[in-house]
Amino acid sequence: MNASAPTSGAGKRPPPYPHKADKNPLQSSVELVKDKNGISQLILRNNDASATVSLLGAQVISWKTKRTGELLFLSKKAIFNPPTAVRGGIPICFPEFKNNETREDHGFVRNRIWVIEENPPHLSGDFSAKVYVDLFLKPSKEDAKIWPHSFEFRLRISLTALGILSLTSRIRNVDCKNFSFRIVYHTYLSVSDICEVRIEGLETQYYLDNLLQKQRFTEQGASLTFESEVDRVYTDSNNVLAVRDHYKKRTVIIRKDGLPDTVVWNPWDKKSKFIADLGDKEYQEMLCVDGAALENPITLKPGEEWKGDLELSILLIS
């Protein structure tokens, strides 16, 4: 962890934070707390921005700034009780998405308790003005029974003073044989009204429509708007997308690297009624726009490491 003040329960004082934060330690910090079920959460604060990360799944469940309020959707019916995954925030789906190889929907790492890594391997980039935390997961013996591969999964979650939220994943093959995986940052954005939202940056892109047996189409419109259920995978999509919310007068900018695909999903009214941990009308308040490596699985040889980045920033519309 990187912060300007010690975190309760961490056992070590984090390294000194940049000089601006040192002048006012309350401006930047990482706080370790517990939820009502006793699961540890980390609250990252930087200036007027904050992000809350649950160690269940290394899942960001809140991202907000003083000016915008909450930017991620979290269902009022979300279940915080392992091994049930939490509906909302940014669950990480690995090593699969929408298949039954591991017998756990969307993979198992989102249902596991991660640990804080105090001294992770070097990660390139400038983190001097960011508050960040490093999390780590390796498979248990039980995990190996459902997905027989050895790996190390490192995740750095960082937050800038301007509220830019970044997630950097590093997955290393520590097995003696190759393995392949898929990964999705299943990002639930909070929106004012799904009918008043549009996505820009997908024009002319190919997509697979999961509602039509994965038939392939080309996005025709200048922007994607919503009038019914959507479940699509845009393959080899642009690395920068904009999600514009007319009523909230804000735009979420999504930047991704190492994640060639984009998943867009909203269950709409009929399907919402069959999702136990989602309110019947909550589909109106959410939109999933996911950075993903999905269509073509990533293959790692023994000793190889894959890296992927997702960055979310906010632009207010005057």
Image (cartoon, rainbow, N blue to C red):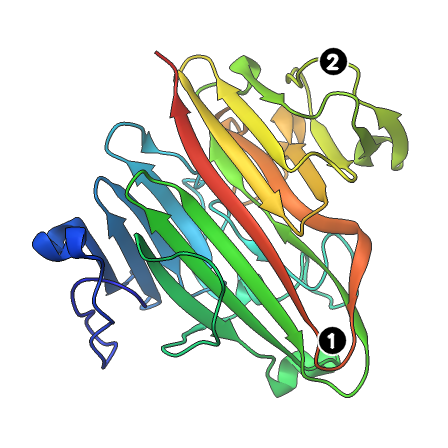
Quadrant that contains the N terminus: bottom left
Q: Is residue 233 above or below residue 24?
A: above
Report if residue 201 is visible in the image.
Answer: yes
Quadrant that contains the C terminus: top left
Helix, strand or loop at disc 2? Answer: loop
Instruction: Give how far across and how far down residue 107 sits, in percent.
Output: 67, 62
Q: Which residue of the protein is positioned furthest toward the left in this rendering? A: 23
The residue tagged 1 is 147
Quarter of the rendering containing residue 178 = bottom right
**In the rendered structure, which amino acid carries the disc numbered 2?**
Gly
For the residues marked 1 and 2, what is the alpha-carbon distance in whole angstroms?
40 Å
The residue tagged 2 is 221
Structural crowding at the residue carrying mark 1, measured as other residues with C-alpha within 10 Å and reported as few (<14), some (14–19) or many (≥20): some
Front in this rendered view, residue 189 or 212? 189
Q: Which mark is residue 192?
A: none
What residue sits 84% from the left and 23% below the top?
A: 218
What residue sits 66% from the left and 15% below the top?
A: 227
Quarter of the rendering containing residue 36 = bottom left
**In the rendered structure, which amino acid carries the disc numbered 1?**
Trp
Instruction: Give how far across and how far down residue 157 sits, in percent.
Output: 42, 57
Helix, strand or loop at disc 1? Answer: loop
Q: Is residue 270 left or right of residue 32?
A: right
- Disc 1 or 2, which lies upstream in sequence? 1
Q: Is residue 169 left or right of residue 318?
A: right
Label 1 vs label 2, nearer the camera: 2
What residue sits 62% from the left and 61% below the top?
A: 307
Instruction: Give how far across and how far down residue 103 sits, in percent.
Output: 73, 66
Front in this rendered view, residue 21 or 224? 21
Q: Is residue 230 above or below residue 177?
A: above
